[in-house]
């Protein structure tokens, strides 16, 4: 792959990733049902307010990023010889390769997500609750196999007569719009159910096809063999171009993006293409007084990418490297450069990229929440929440313990402890101020990152502003005489 191809590939990645440093709801948020947006995690748990209107953009602004194993201190550390910071690859770094590699799974990933509501509102009608949202979402995951870092740090000596499996290497990034309609019903005082139907429209996507991808490096005593059969699907305004032999050469940036033509960019952002569907469903149940159990599945759905902007890149080939003979060329720098150039040319000729246009489907990555909450008193409760998240063939599991207190009407606070992303030092906090007519909230699972961020593997944050009415505490029905109630 030449420099032009690399440059255009990174341009495509930059469009998708540069705006995606933000994301989905912190787990501490699950039991903060004073906030209407808590229904995003379980549509069956009805908000306390009878009506709410989310201020555009700022009503629900979410940030989430991290990885499944590594903390910042695994990558960046203090130089033992002075006060500067160095990476783990620095010669002076106090770095243990075996310890570093032992922290990795076979398939690892970095992620970044973003969500904001452009429009949202909800209202109650007796025991029914209805809500609508128009949201923009971006989610990005970059996968990398452990074998890739083993090769980088220890070389291929550990793979003699066996293969290093690099097939997990890939990316999945999606920018899309969501229209959601939520309906929940309080069956009785102990049971409620909810469902949310969502219509999706995809703006941009790049995704590796992990079902067919194959990338292996086999090492024998005298040769290295590389075998690749990779497929990457893209849907974006970028235009693919080919060389004179018909092979993929680069992506070209359309003039309206390159020249920042505002009207054309807005028209592109407002398009309704690449339709998909998704559903959220939840249940809330109180088996005994003070104890509530709940479960939900969120973002169970897909997007079909089927416009003329779809491009499928396929890279196939095999290459055998038997070394370079430099016995007659030692000291001849020009000759060494020529052999290196010949090696690059040979690699490029062995792995040709072709492009085609065919529709494909991506999945959102469903999240399953299971929770239990115990009401210690009218103003204090404790909760437990389990989250299972399937992301690019990875199962990400997280557990959160929370304590939730309501000092008085208009002030609610939550404190949580979470085990997530291989990290055990996640202290979270949530705060809700106000109720009617104005409510502000903020919540994070990782405020502890301010204290020991170098040991944290992830970070999330969410805040918003709502206009709300009818947020008074429900009053218990008083006993009345039978005859009076009848007549």
Image (cartoon, rainbow, N blue to C red):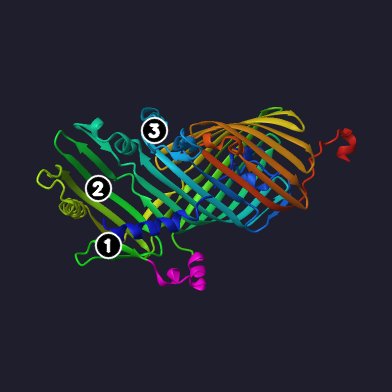
Q: Is 85 on the left or on the right of 217, as rendered? A: right
> What residue range appears in magenta?
253-271
Q: Nearer the viewer, residue 257 or 344?
A: 344
Q: CA distance from mark 2 to mark 3?
A: 23 Å
Sequence order check: which comes first, mark 2 or mark 3? 3
Q: CA distance from mark 1 to mark 2?
A: 18 Å
Is residue 264 a member of the stretch shown in magenta? yes
- According to the picture, the residue beneath numbered tag 3 turns out to be 105
Residue at image x 40%, y 33%? Answer: 104
Q: Is 234 on the left or on the right of 289, as rendered? A: left
Q: Nearer the viewer, residue 378 or 14?
A: 14
Q: Secondary structure at mark 2?
A: strand
Q: Secondary structure at mark 3?
A: loop
Residue 4 at what x, y percent from top left?
30, 61
- According to the picture, the residue beneath numbered tag 2 turns out to be 229
User: What label sits on residue 249 in the rendered view?
Assistant: 1
């Amino acid at each position: 792959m030449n420099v032009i191809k690399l440059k255009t590939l990174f341009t495509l990645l930059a469009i998708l990733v540069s705006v995606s440093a933000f994301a989905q709801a912190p787990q501490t948020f699950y039991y903060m049902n004073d906030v209407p947006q808590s229904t995003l995690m379980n549509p069956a748990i009805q908000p306390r307010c009878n009506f709410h209107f989310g201020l555009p953009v700022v009503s629900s602004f979410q940030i989430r990023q991290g990885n499944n194993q590594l903390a910042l201190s695994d990558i960046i550390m203090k130089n033992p010889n002075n006060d500067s910071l160095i990476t783990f690859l620095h010669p002076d770094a106090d770095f243990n390769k075996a310890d570093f590699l032992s922290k990795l799974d076979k398939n690892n990933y970095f992620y970044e997500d973003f969500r904001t509501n452009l429009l949202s509102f909800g209202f109650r009608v007796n025991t029914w609750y209805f809500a609508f949202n128009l949201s923009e979402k971006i989610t990005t995951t970059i996968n990398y196999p452990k074998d890739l870092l083993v090769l980088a740090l220890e070389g291929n000596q550990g793979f003699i007569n066996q293969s290093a499996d690099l097939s997990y290497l890939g990316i999945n990034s999606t920018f899309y719009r969501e229209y959601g309609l939520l309906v929940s019903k309080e069956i009785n005082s102990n049971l409620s159910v909810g469902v949310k139907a969502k219509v999706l429209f995809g703006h941009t996507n790049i995704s590796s096809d992990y079902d067919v991808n194959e990338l292996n490096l086999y090492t024998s005593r005298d040769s290295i063999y590389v075998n690749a059969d990779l497929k990457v699907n893209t849907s974006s305004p970028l235009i693919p171009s080919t060389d004179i032999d018909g092979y993929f050469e680069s992506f070209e940036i359309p003039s309206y993006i390159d020249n920042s033509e505002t009207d054309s960019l807005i028209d592109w952002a407002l398009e309704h293409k690449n339709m998909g569907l998704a559903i959220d469903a939840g249940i809330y149940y109180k088996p005994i007084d003070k104890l509530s159990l709940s479960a939900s599945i969120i973002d169970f759905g897909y997007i079909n990418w089927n416009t003329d902007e779809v491009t499928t890149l396929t890279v196939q080939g095999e290459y055998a490297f038997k070394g370079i003979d430099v016995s007659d060329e030692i000291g001849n720098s020009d000759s060494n450069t020529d052999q290196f150039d010949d090696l690059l040319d040979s690699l490029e000729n062995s792995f040709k990229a072709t492009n085609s246009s065919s529709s494909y489907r991506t999945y959102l990555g469903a999240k399953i929440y299971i929770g239990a909450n115990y009401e210690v008193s009218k103003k204090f409760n404790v909760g437990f929440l389990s989250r299972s998240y399937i992301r690019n063939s990875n199962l990400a599991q997280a557990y959160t313990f929370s304590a939730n207190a309501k000092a008085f009407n208009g002030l609610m606070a939550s404190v949580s402890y979470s085990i997530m992303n291989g990290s055990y030092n996640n202290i979270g906090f949530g705060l809700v101020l106000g109720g009617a007519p104005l409510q502000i909230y903020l919540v994070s699972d990782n405020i502890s990152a301010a204290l020991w961020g170098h040991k944290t593997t992830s970070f999330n944050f969410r805040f918003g502003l709502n206009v709300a009415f009818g947020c008074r505490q429900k009053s218990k029905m008083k006993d009345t005489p039978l005859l009076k109630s009848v007549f």
